[in-house]
Image: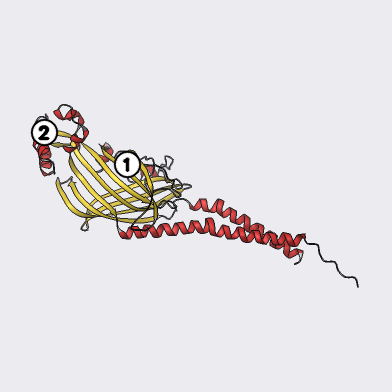
């Protein structure tokens, strides 16, 4: 082998080693963040135990529901993304609820960001948030996370509950759980949901009459209402939930969700303070509230399949560029470099005299 070829092999080998390292250190970290072209739809199904129509003050009860969650990146600014999320609930094709939100998200950590363009703050449903609001980050760690609740306008715990095999997908996932007993819904969210902050006594009595209350509580409420002065009664709203989330740790994709959400209306605390209910335990106070929204849902089989396919696709690309290609480049490069160096170290053969 001549020295010229040796130099070529050595240089090509060194370039391959450097290229493999650059892919692992530069290219792959850039892949481990929310893609700028994200546009995802997930479907859920469940049961609506109760839903109050604020316009007619009639209840929808015990009907099957379909929920759709569509989120897409609207704009990016370096490591930040403006994401629009649309959530709709229907029953038999008829709309029951629709919520539109915009989030400013760090594309790597998936945490809500407090640094964003002024124009983003003017988009529909945009409010300052903290914690995880959309999904989990890539390379999710085995530890508790912090989520966000629009109802409370505060953070909520997402508890790491172990590494489990998700039955429907067959995937190895991290299970996170989160729950809360009834806590007051933030007034801004009460207004956003179109719920009244006070009701005429007769209208409140009519709503209570439709509620599924225990006989004891139902017998107590008329006397309680009669003890409240004035023609209208101030109301407060409370939210309780319990959720399970199966996460693909490599990509942060939510494979499946099971959740139960309950929102109730009750007499405002400042009014209850003047009644015998003021000193009752919170659990008993909650029994005197009327559920204005109560539903349970989980991801459809098709959405679980879609989530698995998305996780496999994204995870496959990360493995390809993070392990396979750099590994091949380093191994081949090292081999070429060794061959090239060996050839350069050999002494050239002497030329015979004529």
Question: Which label is found at residue 149?
Answer: 1
Residue 89 image offset from top left, x and y in percent = 25, 52
Task: Answer left or right for 150 relative to 12.
Answer: left
Residue 184: quadrant of the picture:
top left
- Determine whether 190 is above or below 16 in the image: above
Q: Position of residue 74 (x, y in %)?
A: 40, 51
Q: Is residue 133 left or right of residue 265?
A: right
Classify 338 as above or below 212.
below
Mark 2–mark 1 Cα distance, whole angstroms, equals: 32 Å
Q: Residues within 10 Å of mark 1 (few under 14, many from 20)?
A: some
**Image: 253 above or below 156:** below
Can residue 194 be seen here? The reply is: no
Residue found at x 54% / y 59% = 324
Marks 2 and 1, the one that precedes in the sequence = 1
Quadrant of image for the C terminus: bottom right
Residue 200 in the figure: left or right of residue 36: left
**Left/right of residue 74 with respect to residue 292 in the rendered view:** right
Q: Which mark is residue 225?
A: 2
Q: Name which residue lies at 28% across and 48% down.
A: 259
Residue 210 point in image, percent of width and height = 11, 44
- Label 2, secondary structure: give it: helix
Q: Residues within 10 Å of mark 2 (few under 14, many from 20)?
A: some
x then y, percent, for residue 322? 53, 55
Q: Indicate the quadrant where residue 38 lies.
A: bottom left
Which numbered tag is attached to residue 343? none
Q: Quadrant of the N terminus?
A: bottom right
- Count up the numbered dots: 2
Q: Nearer the viewer, residue 244 or 307?
A: 244
- Residue extending farthest to the right is 354
Q: Residue at x 38, y 42 (%)?
A: 121
């Amino acid at each position: 082998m001549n020295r010229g070829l040796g130099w070529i092999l050595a240089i090509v080998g060194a370039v391959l080693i450097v290229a493999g390292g650059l892919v692992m250190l530069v290219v792959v970290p850039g892949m481990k963040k929310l893609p700028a072209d994200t546009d995802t739809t997930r479907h859920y199904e469940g049961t609506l135990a109760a839903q109050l129509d604020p316009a007619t003050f009639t209840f929808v009860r015990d009907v099957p529901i379909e929920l759709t969650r569509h989120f897409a990146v609207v704009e990016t600014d370096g490591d930040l993304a403006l994401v629009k999320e649309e959530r709709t609930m229907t029953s038999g094709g008829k709309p029951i609820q629709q919520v539109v939100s915009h989030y400013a998200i760090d594309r790597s950590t998936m945490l809500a960001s407090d640094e964003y363009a002024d124009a983003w703050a003017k988009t529909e449903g945009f409010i300052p948030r903290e914690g995880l609001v959309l999904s989990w980050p890539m390379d999710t760690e085995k530890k508790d996370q912090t989520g966000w609740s629009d109802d409370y306008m505060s953070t909520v715990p997402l508890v790491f509950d172990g590494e489990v095999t998700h039955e429907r997908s067959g995937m190895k996932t991290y299970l996170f759980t989160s729950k809360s007993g009834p806590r007051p819904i933030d007034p801004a969210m009460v207004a956003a949901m179109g719920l009244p902050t006070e009701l005429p006594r007769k209208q409140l009595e009519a709503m209570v009459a439709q509620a599924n209350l225990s006989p004891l509580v139902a017998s107590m409420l008329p006397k309680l209402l009669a003890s409240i002065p004035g023609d209208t009664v101030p109301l407060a709203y409370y939210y309780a939930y319990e959720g399970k989330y199966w996460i693909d740790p490599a990509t942060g994709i939510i494979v499946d969700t099971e959740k139960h959400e309950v929102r109730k209306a009750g007499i405002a605390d400042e009014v209850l303070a003047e009644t015998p209910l003021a000193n009752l335990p919170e659990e008993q106070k909650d029994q005197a509230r009327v559920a204005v929204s109560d539903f349970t849902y989980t991801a459809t089989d098709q959405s679980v399949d879609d989530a698995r396919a998305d996780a496999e696709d994204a995870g496959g690309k990360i493995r390809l560029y993070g392990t396979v290609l750099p590994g091949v480049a380093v191994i081949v490069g090292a081999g070429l470099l060794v061959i090239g160096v060996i050839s350069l170290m050999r002494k050239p053969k002497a030329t015979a005299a004529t």
